[in-house]
Image (cartoon, rainbow, N blue to C red):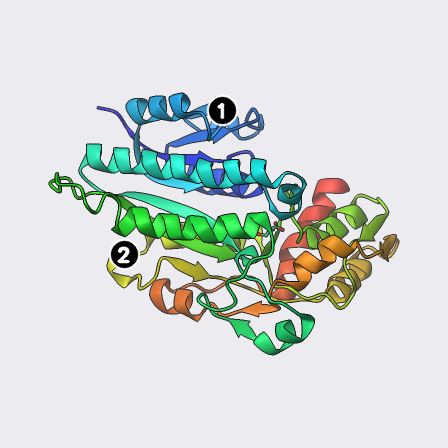
């Protein structure tokens, strides 16, 4: 009999690293898919790693045949800044890639006679506020508010949330052969900006947070590309991984929605700067606003309301801002760049 596996796309990315480490510690069999060869440190932790594209239908077809997939974490994506350089390519990867994985999940569900879980990281980029005034007055934004994204990435995330809901509840609703009712068990989280001590993001617009910290720790000068008063929600990677696996494990009958906000703390760029400078007093950090990227961050809410996640699947972050920096980020980053 084939063994049950968890499929992770975008396995080489920041979340992939954290998730593979977590699932490996739980003895879960992992099939990792990424466009780049999996990091050497991760290879012993997965059953199989495949170098390939989420747009490669043949490859995905083979995955269906070769593995019994119980859960898909579809992490592969082009982030918000990078997507603006080639929006159509980003659309293909972010939307058509997701469609391909949803289709794969349906095939697996029908074949196995049980719903395959599809865990989809969405983003704060799914929101869009028009002005700084609106951003200030919006307060803690709920999942169904301010859904007017201004980036291709944000549009892609918002649309894929809807695709997931469609595949979960309405896929082939007019088909006559209704005997096979197993579709996809779709669950999504809108993440804030993420900060990890182990990895760096690539191509995002919340990257100024992690970049400031990693540059200071590695003695590199850094030009922060947003104004000091810029404020968006952030979360550390261990909490992001906790959210993914907690939502995956939640009983379906407790879930009242498909998409959930999660958040942890909302520092301004100046506050991140102050914390980083206190930890690394020689840090050379300046603020030089990059207007287009500033506009993107200005369109994201200052804070989001994660009460639905708290209610439905007992979500709560382990790290507030002080614990995040003092007990996780700063010690781990010092160890990474300046081991004693
Ligand atoms: N971190 C992402 C980005 O900046 C937002 O989800 O694109």
Which is nearer the eye, 338 or 300? 300
Residue 203 shows in this picture: no
Q: Which residue is mark 2?
A: 251
Q: Which mark is residue 52?
A: 1
Q: Quadrant of residue 102?
A: top left
Residue farthest to the bottom, as pictured? 137
Q: Is mark 1 within 8 Å of ligand 1?
A: no
Q: In the image, is residue 236 above or below residue 118?
A: below
Report crowding for label 1: few under 14, some 14 to 19, many 20 or more residues within 10 A (C-alpha): some
Q: Is residue 116 left or right of residue 39?
A: left
The quadrant the N terminus occupies is top left
The residue lying at 43 percent from left, 40 percent from top is 98
Q: Is residue 49 left or right of residue 169?
A: right
Secondary structure state at the residue bearing disc 2: loop
Q: Residue 206 at x, y = what percent?
A: 66, 54
Q: Residue 326 at x, y = what percent?
A: 67, 60
Residue 100 shows in this picture: yes
Which is nearer the eye, 156 or 28? 156
Q: Residue 28 at x, y = what percent?
A: 37, 36
Q: Nearer the viewer, mark 2 or mark 1?
A: 1
| Mark with earlier residue (2, 1) | 1
The residue lying at 61 percent from left, 78 percent from top is 137
């Amino acid at each position: 009999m084939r063994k049950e596996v968890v499929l992770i796309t975008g396995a080489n990315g920041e979340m992939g690293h954290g998730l593979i480490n977590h699932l490996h510690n739980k003895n879960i069999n992992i099939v990792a898919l990424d466009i780049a060869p999996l990091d050497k440190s991760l290879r012993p932790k997965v059953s199989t790693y495949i170098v390939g594209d989420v747009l490669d239908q043949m490859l995905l077809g083979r995955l269906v045949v070769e593995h019994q997939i119980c859960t898909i974490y579809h992490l592969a994506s082009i982030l918000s800044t990078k997507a603006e350089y080639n929006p159509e390519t980003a659309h293909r990867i972010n939307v058509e890639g997701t469609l391909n994985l949803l289709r794969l999940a349906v095939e697996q569900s029908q074949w196995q006679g049980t719903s395959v879980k599809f865990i989809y990281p969405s983003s704060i980029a799914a929101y869009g506020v028009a002005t700084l005034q609106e951003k200030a007055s919006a307060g803690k934004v709920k999942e169904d508010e301010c859904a007017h994204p201004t980036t291709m990435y944000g549009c892609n995330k918002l649309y894929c949330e809807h695709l997931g809901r469609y595949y979960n509840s309405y896929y082939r609703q007019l088909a006559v052969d209704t005997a096979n009712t197993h579709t996809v068990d779709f669950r999504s989280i809108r993440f804030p900006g993420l900060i990890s001590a182990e990895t760096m993001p690539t191509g995002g617009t919340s990257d100024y947070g992690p970049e400031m910290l990693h540059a200071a720790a590695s003695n590199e000068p850094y030009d922060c590309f947003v104004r000091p008063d810029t404020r968006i929600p952030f979360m550390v990677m261990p909490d992001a991984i906790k959210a993914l696996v907690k939502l995956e494990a939640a009983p379906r009958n407790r879930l009242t929605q498909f998409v959930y906000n999660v958040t942890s703390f909302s520092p301004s760029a100046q506050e991140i700067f102050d914390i980083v400078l206190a930890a690394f007093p020689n840090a050379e950090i300046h603020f030089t606003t990059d207007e287009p990227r500033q506009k993107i961050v200005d369109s994201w809410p200052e804070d989001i309301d994660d009460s639905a996640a708290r209610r439905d699947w007992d979500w709560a972050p382990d790290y507030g801002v002080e614990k995040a920096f003092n007990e996780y980020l700063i010690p781990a980053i010092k160890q990474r760049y300046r081991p004693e």
